[in-house]
């Protein structure tokens, strides 16, 4: 029978009070043994007086006990009860020993010296260590409640933020409805869309916090608090075991010192040997249940409260960025929950190993030093409990998200690390500037994806991994992220140039160009850029430039990147047939976007129509 399985979560205070009072009794017992050893020579008078004072102290503890224990529990055993074999609580054994102590009239001085060093001091040390263990268990329980209350407070803050975002959205919508001009309506519509996104994020956070609070509440009330109660029970039972062991040692010394009191001492030893650490716990539980003091009302689960009148749903919003944010939160929660569970298992295994090493083959404590080992094991279990509580929070987040989105594919998540930006950068997610001068950002350690810290959760888990091309000179320019950005920039500028030429009077396309034609032109322009890079590194036929092949070599102006390409591929043989040259020349005729290629083939550096004539 354990306190955690039989009693209710709100009875931890009663358990703490019980253990505290019983430790006070053990402390008083250790003081009694010390004083007895000092007063061994004045045995007749002094011992009787101390035994009477001890009885009075026990009676006072019985009258003030919160669980209804009365003085009848301290009644001495009868002759038949003392000779029985059923397990006993500690208190009847203490009374039996006290009676034997009162009847004893003399004690050897050596017995007093041994009793002081081997019994009284040992019991005092053990009681002090057990008092520390009780205090640590109480502090852990209070810390547990504090963590739970912090989580509840976070939930309440999330609700307050959600309500504020809802009011802001309603205000924006009202301004949009009252706007008279289309410009104002568009402005307030954009503001309402932004407020809706903020409201949805606040709502999702609120829902997640409610889920976390519920899981934490159940974990604290039904898993972690019972463990703390069992830890208190362990302190109490170790107290009983220590007192039992030391009282037996005291009685053995008394038996050796006083032959005339041998019979009374054997009787007391028999009674003390029947003491079992769990009997006191069983009696405490039964008294709590029988007196009706063990009561508990399960607190209801927290509920999400939204603006139902305004058509709000108590489900997580799944607009645009919200799904990416939720998926990232789910993946993060999955990883952190696994880490916390592994940490908790490691702590529990360490605690079990420490307990086995401390107790040994006998399965019981032998010295006060062993109590330190058990306290170390208890501390490891408390750390495991906190890790389990952390895992519960992450599991609650994952369960809440997957309940809404379904199973979340782990994908290829980014490994973001905080980054302090010294020079302004562009966010790879939203395209805005990150600023500079110590601005905070996040950068993936694998693919170098860089974004605002606020955009980190919005990035889809599609990391491409480390770029193997970043180690060579050529690929460092064309294969890295910087090269890809430069390529995109060239693509956008080329597309804009082609669009301007087309709209300015291209004879083949007329005065205007459709969206499909513009996209096709942009795609052709990008292909042209790639072809131009390949062409620039090929040997140019002398006849194509209109000069004597035997005496002249054309001089072509090339960019540094083209020179690097030519050097990197100088050992590669390539061919460029006349059909390919013709298609590129025709392409240059249509777009008029690049005159360098035309000059390579002798087409001149003029307009598009001139290039076509030369071709």
Image (tube, helix red, strand yellow):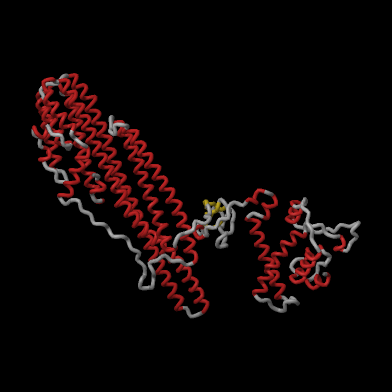
What residue is shown at x 39% (from left), y 64% (from top)? 162
Q: Position of residue 152 (x, y in %)?
A: 34, 56
Q: Camera-side residue: 165 or 197?
A: 197
Q: Position of residue 607 (x, y in %)?
A: 79, 71
User: What is the quadrant of the C terminus in the image?
Assistant: bottom right
Outermost front residue: 85
> Relative to residue 582, is residue 354 depicted above or below?
above
What residue is shown at x 68% (from left), y 49% (from top)? 472
> Relative to residue 388, is residue 172 depicted above or below?
below
Outermost bottom residue: 180
Q: Quadrant of residue 488?
A: bottom right
What residue is shown at x 25% (from left), y 42% (from top)? 233
Q: Position of residue 6 (x, y in %)?
A: 23, 48
Q: Is residue 163 rendered to the left or right of residue 468?
A: left
What residue is shown at x 72% (from left), y 77% (from top)? 509
Q: Camera-side residue: 489 or 600?
A: 600
Q: Quadrant of residue 593?
A: bottom right
User: What is the quadrant of the N terminus in the image?
Assistant: top left
The number of discs equals 0
Q: Is residue 441 rendered to the left or right of residue 274?
A: right
> Relative to residue 13, is residue 25 depicted above or below?
above
Q: Position of residue 581 (x, y in %)?
A: 79, 65
């Amino acid at each position: 029978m354990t306190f955690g399985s039989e009693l209710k979560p709100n009875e931890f205070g009663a358990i703490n009070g019980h253990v505290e009072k019983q430790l006070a009794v053990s402390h008083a017992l250790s003081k009694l043994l010390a004083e007895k050893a000092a007063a061994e020579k004045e045995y007749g008078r002094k011992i009787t007086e101390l035994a009477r004072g001890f009885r009075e102290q026990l009676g006072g503890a019985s009258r003030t006990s919160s669980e209804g224990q009365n003085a009848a529990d301290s009644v001495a055993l009868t002759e038949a009860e003392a000779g029985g074999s059923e397990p006993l609580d500690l208190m009847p054994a203490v009374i039996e020993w006290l009676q034997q102590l009162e009847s004893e009239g003399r004690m050897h001085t050596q017995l007093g010296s041994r009793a002081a060093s081997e019994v009284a001091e040992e019991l005092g040390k053990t009681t002090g260590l057990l008092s520390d263990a009780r205090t640590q268990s109480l502090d852990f329980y209070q810390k547990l409640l504090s963590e739970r209350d912090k989580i509840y407070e976070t939930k309440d803050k999330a609700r307050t933020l959600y309500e504020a975002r809802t009011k802001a959205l309603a205000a924006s919508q009202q301004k949009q409805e009252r706007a008279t001009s289309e410009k104002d309506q568009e402005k307030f519509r954009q503001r309402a869309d932004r407020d809706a996104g903020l409201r949805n994020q606040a709502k999702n956070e609120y829902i997640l916090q409610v889920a976390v609070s519920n899981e934490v509440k159940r974990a604290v009330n039904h898993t972690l608090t019972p463990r703390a109660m069992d830890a208190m029970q362990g302190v109490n039972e170790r107290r009983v075991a220590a007192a039992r062991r030391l009282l037996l040692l005291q009685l053995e010394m008394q038996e050796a010192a006083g032959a005339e009191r041998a019979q009374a001492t054997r009787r007391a030893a028999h009674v003390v040997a029947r003491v079992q650490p769990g009997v006191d716990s069983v009696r405490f539980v039964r008294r709590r249940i029988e007196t009706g003091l063990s009561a508990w009302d399960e607190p209801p689960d927290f509920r999400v409260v939204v603006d139902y009148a305004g058509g709000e749903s108590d489900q997580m919003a799944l607009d645009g960025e919200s799904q990416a944010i939720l998926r990232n939160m789910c993946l993060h929660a999955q990883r952190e929950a696994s880490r916390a569970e592994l940490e908790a298992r490691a702590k529990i295994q360490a605690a079990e190993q420490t307990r086995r090493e401390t107790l040994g083959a006998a399965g019981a404590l032998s010295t006060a030093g062993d109590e330190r080992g058990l306290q170390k094991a208890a501390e490891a279990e408390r750390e495991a409990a906190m890790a389990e509580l952390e895992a519960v929070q992450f599991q609650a987040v994952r369960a809440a998200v997957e309940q809404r989105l379904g199973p979340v594919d782990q994908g290829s998540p980014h490994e973001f690390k905080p980054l302090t930006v010294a020079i302004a950068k562009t966010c790879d997610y939203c395209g805005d500037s990150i600023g500079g001068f110590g601005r905070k950002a996040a950068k993936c350690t694998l693919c170098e994806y860089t974004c605002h810290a606020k955009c980190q959760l919005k990035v889809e888990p599609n990391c491409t991994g480390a770029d193997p091309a970043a180690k060579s000179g050529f690929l460092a320019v064309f294969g890295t992220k910087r090269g890809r950005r430069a390529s995109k920039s060239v693509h956008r500028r080329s597309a804009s140039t082609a669009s301007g030429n087309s709209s300015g009077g291209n004879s083949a396309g007329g005065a205007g160009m459709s969206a499909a034609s513009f996209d096709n032109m942009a795609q052709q322009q990008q292909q042209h850029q790639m072809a131009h890079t390949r062409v620039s590194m090929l040997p140019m036929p002398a006849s194509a430039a209109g000069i004597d092949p035997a005496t002249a070599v054309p001089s072509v102006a090339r960019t540094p990147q083209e020179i690097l390409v030519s050097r990197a591929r100088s050992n590669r043989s390539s061919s460029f047939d006349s059909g390919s040259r013709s298609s590129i020349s025709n392409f240059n005729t249509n777009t008029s976007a690049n005159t360098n290629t035309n000059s390579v083939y002798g087409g001149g550096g003029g307009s598009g129509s001139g290039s076509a004539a030369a071709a």
